């Protein structure tokens, strides 16, 4: 009985500790800049930090941008 309770507490604390790290994308602020090739000025904005997956990008279906509240529409498997 004590082993079950301890095991349950261990598993739940493990999930609570790691879940925010997997679920939340890291954010990077991009400074505003000028594109000389097209003559375009790009305002500063936020994006997810680069990694090897598309599943946590703001524009991916199922996610939303916390800064603009826009829902993602892109297919992550393309």
Image: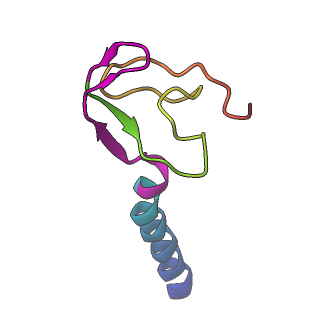
User: 35 or 18: which is nearer to us?
Assistant: 35
Total of numbered circles in the picture? 0
Write down the region rendered in magenta: 21-43
Q: Residue 14, percent across and down? A: 46, 70
Q: Answer whether residue 27 is magenta in the image.
A: yes
User: 16 or 48: which is nearer to us?
Assistant: 48
Residue 33, placed above or below residue 57: above
The residue depicted at 50 percent of the width and 86 percent of the height is 2
Q: Tell me which corner region of the image, top left, top right, bottom left or bottom right, holds residue 32.
A: top left
Q: Residue 39, percent across and down? A: 36, 13
Q: Residue 63, percent across and down? A: 50, 30
User: 31 or 72: which is nearer to us?
Assistant: 31
Q: How is the image coloured?
A: rainbow
Residue that sits furthest to the right in the current view = 78
Residue 13, placed above or below residue 35: below
Q: Residue 78, percent across and down? A: 74, 31
The residue depicted at 48 percent of the width and 19 percent of the height is 71
Q: Answer whether residue 11 is magenta in the image.
A: no
4 displayed left or right of 70: right
31 displayed left or right of 19: left
The residue depicted at 61 percent of the width and 47 percent of the height is 53
């Amino acid at each position: 009985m004590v082993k079950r309770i301890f095991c349950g507490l261990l598993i739940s604390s493990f999930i609570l500790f790691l879940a925010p790290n997997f679920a939340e994308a890291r954010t990077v602020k991009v400074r505003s800049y000028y594109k000389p090739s097209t003559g375009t000025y790009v305002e500063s904005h936020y994006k997810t930090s680069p990694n090897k997956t598309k599943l946590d990008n703001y524009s991916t279906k199922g996610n939303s941008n916390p800064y603009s509240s826009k829902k993602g529409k892109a297919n992550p498997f393309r």
